């Protein structure tokens, strides 16, 4: 189906910017933790830095959920794209120990288990405006497909430093690409139309808050998403990359190929998710795909070889992210249009905050318990989330799934 028939220009610009932004996120996710290890950071400190990175993103997302609709969605997106430019510049000009720490605080780089920052929250609120409700889940599927496909390209080029030399300067071309993505993103966002903005009520000076109808739904979803993301934080790309690097002595090229493959498999699953959701519903697609994926995840550290572990990881990835476009579509469907920005913001903040704690615990578990313990912990928490969200929301359906009596 042609985008021209169901998605407007704003939607297409967002998809283009998503690809520009997530190519650097792809290689940063693979090499960021390993880069810090080359700077002399031990696993616990690496985990703490990753926690700081995710937590700063959570603070940005919380701010966005309160003020973006008032100061302007377009202006806010341009600002955060420029923050990525600054973070990339810090990494490019210095290989001191403080550079990745400061860049992690300033930027919105995705080094966790999927993107949860301010870009996601605002784009999640904007996308339903770029198409009709019949194509909302399809739009989110393409949005995530573009992101994961672009991340796979980034993962593929993560091995570039080993061909440019053995020193830290070999990373600079990739850091230059990261800062350039921020500049390109700020330009693309500046081209968005006024149609993405929310018109405040005349004479209103209040910050956007949830309506009484949406508040209990968002509160419960936020709590459940926090459980899922707390588990996901144990297996962010950087942690998984470090796991394969340490356990199987795989180098950048091999790691890049592995994570490129996982991103490609994940991207293809998004279109399947939209088709399945049309048949069995958004919530069932979320849960019924997630449970087997988490069983595969728990099995990864028990694989007898690197090949077996990679196979299980790919099986996991073929199912694990089907809940992403369906979850985003579900949240936007069960709240009023005026509540979409704060709903996206609050649910993503809960995910970011919960995810910010896990990398430190994962680093401690790797150092003090067992290198595979983060994967088992992640699978257990995510299984608990699957059961709880199905039990809590199985009777709350999006408007398009409610059949007239």
Image (cartoon, helix red, strand yellow):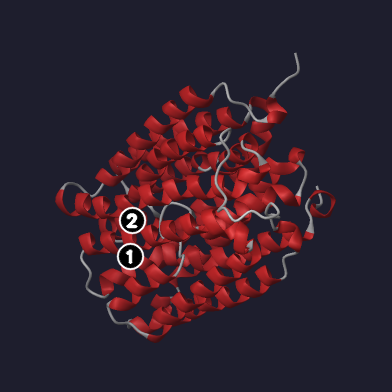
Q: Residue at x 52, y 26 (%)?
A: 393
161 to the left or right of 216: left
Taking depth in this image into account, of 163 and 133 the one nearest to the observer is: 133
Taking depth in this image into account, of 362 and 105 the one nearest to the observer is: 105
State the image coordinates of residue 76 (x, y, percent, origin top left). Answer: 58, 66
Residue to which mark 1 is pinned: 33
State the image coordinates of residue 367 (x, y, percent, origin top left). Answer: 18, 54
State the image coordinates of residue 391 (x, y, percent, origin top left). Answer: 47, 22
State the image coordinates of residue 231 (x, y, percent, origin top left). Answer: 36, 42
How far is mark 2 from mark 1, CA to CA? 7 Å
Q: Is residue 303 visible?
A: no
- Marks 2 and 1 close (CB-CB < 8 Å): yes
- Vertical order, 61 against 391 (above or below): below
Residue to which mark 2 is pinned: 239
- Vertical order, 277 against 351 (above or below): above
133 to the left or right of 187: right
> Dot 2: within a 10 Å radius of its alpha carbon, few (fewer than 14), some, or many (20 or more) residues?
many
Q: Residue at x 73, y 50 (%)?
A: 129
> Dot 1: within a 10 Å radius of its alpha carbon, few (fewer than 14), some, or many (20 or more) residues?
many
320 to the left or right of 231: right
Q: Residue at x 48, y 53 (%)?
A: 116
Where residue 399 sits, quadrant-wise, is top right
Q: Is residue 354 visible?
A: yes
- Vertical order, 217 against 340 (above or below): above
Task: Give the number of callouts.
Answer: 2
Give the structural element (helix, strand or loop) at label 2. Answer: helix
Looking at the image, the residue that sits furthest to the top is: 405
Where residue 45 sits, quadrant-wise, is bottom left
The first of marks 2 and 1 along the sequence is: 1
Give the structural element (helix, strand or loop) at label 1. Answer: helix
């Amino acid at each position: 189906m042609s985008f021209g028939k169901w998605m407007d220009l704003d939607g297409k610009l967002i998809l283009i910017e998503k690809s520009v932004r997530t190519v650097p996120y792809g290689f940063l996710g693979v090499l960021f933790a390993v880069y810090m290890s080359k700077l002399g950071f031990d696993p616990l400190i690496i985990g703490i830095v990753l926690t700081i990175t995710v937590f700063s993103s959570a603070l940005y997302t919380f701010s966005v959920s309160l003020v973006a609709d008032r100061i302007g969605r377009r202006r806010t997106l341009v600002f955060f794209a420029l923050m990525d430019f600054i973070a990339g510049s810090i990494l490019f000009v210095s290989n001191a120990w403080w550079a990745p720490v400061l860049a992690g605080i300033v930027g919105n780089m995705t080094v966790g288990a999927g993107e949860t920052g301010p870009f996601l929250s605002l784009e999640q609120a904007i996308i339903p405006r770029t198409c009709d409700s019949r194509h909302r889940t399809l739009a989110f599927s393409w949005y995530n497909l573009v992101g994961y496909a672009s991340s796979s390209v980034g993962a593929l080029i993560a091995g570039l430093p080993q061909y440019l030399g053995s020193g830290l300067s070999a990373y600079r071309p990739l850091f230059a690409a990261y800062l350039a993505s921020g500049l390109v993103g700020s330009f693309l966002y500046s081209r968005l139309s006024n149609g993405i903005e929310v018109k405040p009520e005349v004479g209103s000076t209040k910050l956007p808050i949830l309506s009484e109808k949406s508040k209990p739904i968002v509160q419960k979803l936020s709590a459940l998403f926090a459980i899922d993301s707390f588990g996901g934080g144990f297996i962010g790309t950087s942690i998984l990359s470090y796991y394969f690097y340490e356990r199987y002595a795989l180098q950048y090229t091999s790691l890049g190929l592995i994570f490129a493959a996982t991103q490609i498999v994940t991207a293809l699953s998004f279109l399947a998710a939209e088709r399945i959701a049309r048949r069995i519903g958004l919530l069932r697609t979320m849960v019924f795909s997630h449970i087997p994926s988490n069983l595969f995840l728990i099995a990864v550290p028990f694989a007898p070889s690197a090949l077996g572990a990679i196979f299980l990881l790919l099986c996991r990835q073929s199912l694990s992210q089907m809940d992403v476009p369906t979850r985003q579509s579900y949240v936007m469907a069960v709240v009023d249009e005026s509540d979409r920005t704060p709903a996206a913001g609050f649910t993503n903040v809960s995910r970011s905050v919960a995810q910010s704690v896990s990398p430190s615990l994962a680093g401690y578990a790797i150092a003090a318990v067992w290198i595979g313990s983060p994967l088992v912990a992640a699978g257990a928490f995510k299984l608990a989330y699957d059961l709880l969200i199905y039990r809590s929301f199985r009777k709350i359906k999006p408007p398009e799934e409610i059949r007239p009596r």
